[in-house]
Amino acid sequence: MSTFRDHLSRRRFLITAGTTALGSIVLKGCTSSQTVSQTSTSPSGASSQAAGVEDEATLYEAAKKEGKVVMYTPLTTQEILGEVGKAFTAKYPGIDFEGTRLSSQVLFQKVNQELQAGLRIVDVVVSGDISHSMKLKEQGQFIQYTPANKERVMAQYRNLDPDNYYHLAGFVPIVLAYNTQKMTAAEAPKSWKDLLQDKYKDKISTGSPAVSGVLGVWALSMQQKYGWDEYMVKFSQLNPLLGRSLADVVPVIATGDRSIAIAPLPITLDRKAKGDPIEIIYPTDGTIMPPCTGGILKTAAHPNAAKLLMNFLGSKEYWDLVGEYYEYPIRDDGSLKGLQSLDAVQAYTPKSEDIRDQAPEIIKKWRDLFGV
């Protein structure tokens, strides 16, 4: 795999997924897996028992026999996943947590390769491209399960899948960010449309929808708002520095290699809080809010532990923890530490069906336009 900026132009570079993205956090030792009280279902023949909220004490006893749970996710960072794992294992002693942070398109490819090979590795799959969850449901790869905290999810996102095969697991709000040592607030754009000005040529950094599912949602949003030719073709003429995962752009503006970025809000705010010369811009034409959704694979080797994890991912305890790292809460009682409300940021999310139907074409058009 190519290394950072390896023999590529300033306009087109690939930041390697690297060991940080592919690394995993394992807490305690691994024990042998044993499937207990799993109910596998398909969209055409769902069991009402599987759809219901299961007793947590019963789940915990079954999960302890499995001894482990494995999750792939584009949310947070590998370091924060370590904190999540410690909290999960402290709440459920005897169950190891293994979490791997991957960009959404890489994650989905990895899941499909494992499924095709008949490997039972991952239990819970979360993606920043909701079309991945929709496809896994359509293929009968998810079991039907209702997490214990579903009723606390914000109403407008509570039933992304009314059949309960996948659920909202988080957001990766996409905003503009700039290096305060390279650009003043007056010089910075105020909207996505402002970003198309010629004065920002050679100053922009972003990722690639071919790797980052959430950036694919951003590109689709720009197409819906302004049209592909009117926005993306003009954007390409500004010679943006293209990385892979959207998380990769934050170090680029923090060091001043580029002065402005299309950036993920949580990681950017975290770097700002740690002292990097970064400022956030909530675009006046809408903060893009790609929903990250997750479900339990029917091939899960640890189905009961996976159900406990889905419960935990919706708990106030979990959101209090990741809220310290500026993760945008999905709960109606979530803390907005350092964040603005959805109304204040004029949140914009394309319809799930549009993401499913148009994401592959968005990736193709992006590659044709940018070459990466």
Image (cartoon, rainbow, N blue to C red):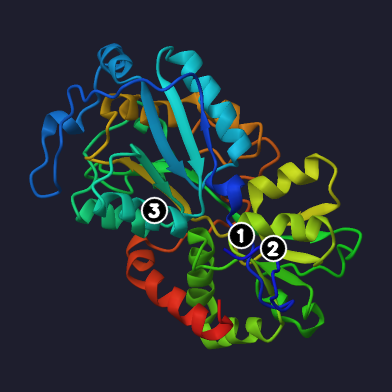
User: Which residue is found at the position 39% from the left and 65% from the top?
Assistant: 355
Q: Which mark is residue 110?
A: 3
Type of residue at label 1?
A: Thr
First in sequence, mark 3 or 2: give its number.
2
User: Which residue is found at the position 86% from the left and 70% from the top?
Assistant: 187
Write down the residue under mark 1: 16
First in sequence, mark 1 or 2: give its number.
2
Type of residue at label 3?
A: Lys
Q: Quadrant location of residue 257?
A: bottom right
Q: Quadrant location of residue 148?
A: top left
Sort mark 2 into few (<14), some (14-19) or many (20+) by Cα contacts within 10 Å. some
**Residue at the far left in the pictured view:** 45
Type of residue at label 2?
A: Phe
Q: Is residue 263 above or below residue 59?
A: below
Q: Is residue 280 above or below residue 167?
A: below
Q: Which mark is residue 4?
A: 2
Element assignment for label 2: loop
User: Which residue is found at the position 46% from the left and 14% from the top?
Assistant: 91
Looking at the rendered image, the quarter that the C terminus falls into is bottom right
Q: Quadrant location of residue 269?
A: top right
Can residue 314 be seen from the camera position used here? no
First in sequence, mark 3 or 1: give its number.
1
Sort mark 3 into few (<14), some (14-19) or many (20+) by Cα contacts within 10 Å. some
Looking at the rendered image, the quarter that the N terminus falls into is bottom right
